[in-house]
Image: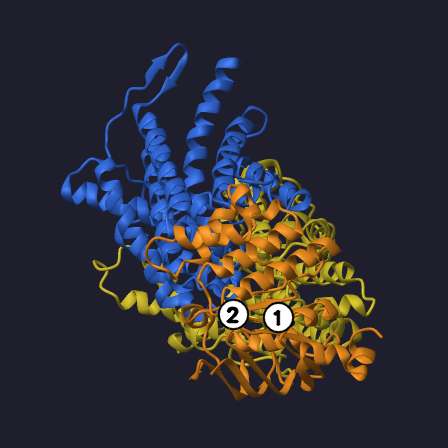
Chain colours: A yellow, B blue, C orange
Amino acid sequence: MMELSGLISYAVFFLTLVGIYAILTLGLNVQWGMTGQFNIGIAGFFAVGAYSTAILSTDRADNWLGGFGLPFPAGLVGAILITIPIAWVIGRITANLRTDYLAIATIGIAEIIRLFFLNESWLSNGVRGIPGISKPFGLGNNGYLLLVIGFVALVYLLVEVARRSPWGRVLRAIRDNEPATAAAGKNIAHFRLQAFVVGSCIMALAGALYAHFVGFISPEAFRPLYGTFLVWVMLIAGGSGNNLGAILGALVVWLVWSSTEMLAGLMPSGLVASESAFRIFLIGVLLQIILVTRPSGLLPERRPPLPGRDQ
Amino acid sequence: MWIEVTQLFINGLLLGSILALGAVGATMIFGVLRFAHFAHGDLMTMGAYFALLVVVSLNLPVMVALPVAMLMTAGLAVGIDQVVYRRIRRVQPVILLISSFATALILRAVVQMIWGSSNQVYATGIQMPWRIGPLAIKPDHILIFCAAAVLVIAVHLFLSRTRMGKAMRAMSDNMNLALITGIPADRVIMWTWAIGGALAAAAGVFLGMDTRLHPVMGWTLLLPVFAATIVGGIGRPYGAIFGGLLIGCAMELSTLIIPGAYKPAVAFAIMILTLIFRPQGIIKGAL
Amino acid sequence: MSLLTAQGIYAGYGEADILQGINLTVGANEIVVIVGPNGAGKSTAMKAVFGLVPIRQGRIEYVGEDITNQPPERMVARGIAYVPQEANVFPSLSVLENLELGAYAIAGDITPRLEKVYEIFPRLKERRQQQAGVMSGGERQMVAMGRALMIEPRLLMLDEPTAGLSPRLIDETFERIREINALGIGVLMVEQNARQALAIADRGYVLASGRNRHEDTGAGLLADPEVAKMFLGG
């Protein structure tokens, strides 16, 4: 009996994190899968969302800004509202950068956001982090899982509707053939910026849900590995451009990531000095294998064959 | 005040020469292969730890271990390219980018698995700095300056005097024309990795001498290295040297006005301004 | 024996073939010019011959050997040199370095080759330390042709060598091409300045929509009223 309930509570914990990662991956899919923006600063927006709701919804504290004791929905909405101007400014600055420059710029921004939360203690309590972020409506873990699943479904529907809308078609047109889309009279910078902001807001939403789930956040949680790298692995594994693939990718990769924990546990402890390093090693190798053998993912986006590309 | 500025300037030149060595390799890889190599910082880390391996196991001074570490890292870089990057080069440049991100994590994990996560040093004991008037300079710093200068001159001679060096610059200039001219792309790419890896190792070893060794030591320098690359103009090794020194000095001098924790942000700000206003690099023409 | 023969070439970048079965020959020591309206496939034909655009059907022979779809490296090794229309120099390298790289595949002393190129383009000798990227369009064209000559080719392929040049430089370029041809080098070129090009050509092809439309001697094409009306601007 005990074992079963332990298993169930582990499954609930596991699935909640999958759900949060699925939302992050959907957000990235709007930017990369649909528009072709190479954002590797996901962790930055994830952090902004988490800290926003933490500051808005925790009880009054002496060591950091707030808390303002606002209810959960206000925390989520606040997280998104705070992200919009930040993402807009970043998007404005970086929208016209080439892919590799955008990658460098976004990872720089994410690192600076992390440094900011690490060093500005008056705002974020620095390295000690913000504790006491409670789950809403008196929900337990099971209830919160349902809430997260609800949000995954909602985001999926919104993103899927967006993808099929004229707006989504323009985004894909930009991704596949920018000059032709510009020639058709579309304001490319505009559409790009919109996609960037929308994607970033989705990431911030995931951050807020994460904060309420774990109850405590610190800059450590927003290192590029967890916030950015795993999300990319999920999207690439699932199939970029395909929203269902993004969710599937989140599930599969988190499953693999969690099972590397067991694998690392099986290794004789003398052989491996650091268990977490071994897990990172495994997941890195897995990604390389996917990239080399199946670069379009498990569920590739369905699209007509591309006209020949110049190498 | 002036003493402080001069001291920071010296520190900046030191950091700058380390960045320059990283940036020369990164810019050549960027130029020849058209992608930002996100594992470059971790190649630096690898180089630093390879040198540690030699220092500890053979009980040699670090400057003797340096060439060995450079060779090992060069081999590692070529190996990574052959096993991973070469297979996906023709797919899409972004796949390469993501792959190099994965390589970065793998390298760091390997360092952690073999050497652990705690700080390490090449030589224990405190080195007494030389006092030149009110300024303090450690003997190691002089050593780093000299070694970096020798390496930069060696790279210059390679690029300007040898056939392979010229071919490398040509490929960075115009890939298609290089193919049409009959330059063997695969060999040039191998040499680019070898040299990029060797220089990254040198940068890592110098960084380890200046501070200490740590699994994320290289990763934290990746952003300044890219900044130096972009400021100097992609694919332009001489520009990268200039960019490295500029970024290094700017990072150190910025501590006069803003907290030291934001040093990477200074490099980043210079980089973004360059990208917006002068995407071809700050300096024009022959460099 | 002819230097180059292309038979029934179908080639293109994507699904659709731009070249729909063209035929070309270049005899040793000939100047052959390809003219035609925009989009006729002239440049594509050159690239296909040089292995830069995949050929789906057809066969290309160079001095009797099959070279269909071989990589550019091999073409250079066999003595075929190609000068693309745009971006045809290494801008950050000096003139001398551009020329040296032209002879990348050549082992041994390249000084005699350099001297030969300098003889045809004395200006390049004067400016050999100059960075190629800052030179004028005409000078860059000289660097590009000089670079191609460094392998001492038997066949020189030029894609619009006079594009963007002033009338005086156009005359000079055609003069140089004749000199190069006089050294025993076959020349295959695409040209917009069709009249002038055909005037120095031994033979010419008119391409339209990826197919051969007319072929004749240079003088013959110039005299053909239909060709004149449709492709030479009246």
Q: Relative to A151, is B60 above or below?
A: above
Viewer-nearest of labels 1 and 2?
Answer: 1
Amino acid beneath label 2? Met
Residue where numbered disc 1 is placed: C189
- The label on residue A234 is 2
Label 2, secondary structure: give it. helix
State the quadrant of the C terminus of chain A. Answer: bottom right
**Dot 2: chain letter:** A
Q: Could you say whether the residue bearing mark 1 is in a helix, strand or loop?
A: strand
Q: In this orientation, which residue lies closer to the viewer: A209 or A229?
A: A229
* Chain containing the residue with disc 1: C
**Looking at the rendering, in which quadrant would you find the N terminus of chain A?**
bottom left
Q: Quadrant of residue B233?
A: top right
Task: Give the quarter of the image for residue C193.
Answer: bottom right
Q: List x then y, in percent, for residue A166.
A: 79, 75
Q: Nearer the viewer, residue C112 or C46?
A: C112
Q: Amino acid at mark 1?
A: Met
Q: Is residue A222 visible?
A: no
Q: Position of residue B192 (x, y in %)?
A: 40, 54
| Image point (38%, 42%), residue name | B155
Residue C155 in the figure: left or right of residue C74 = right
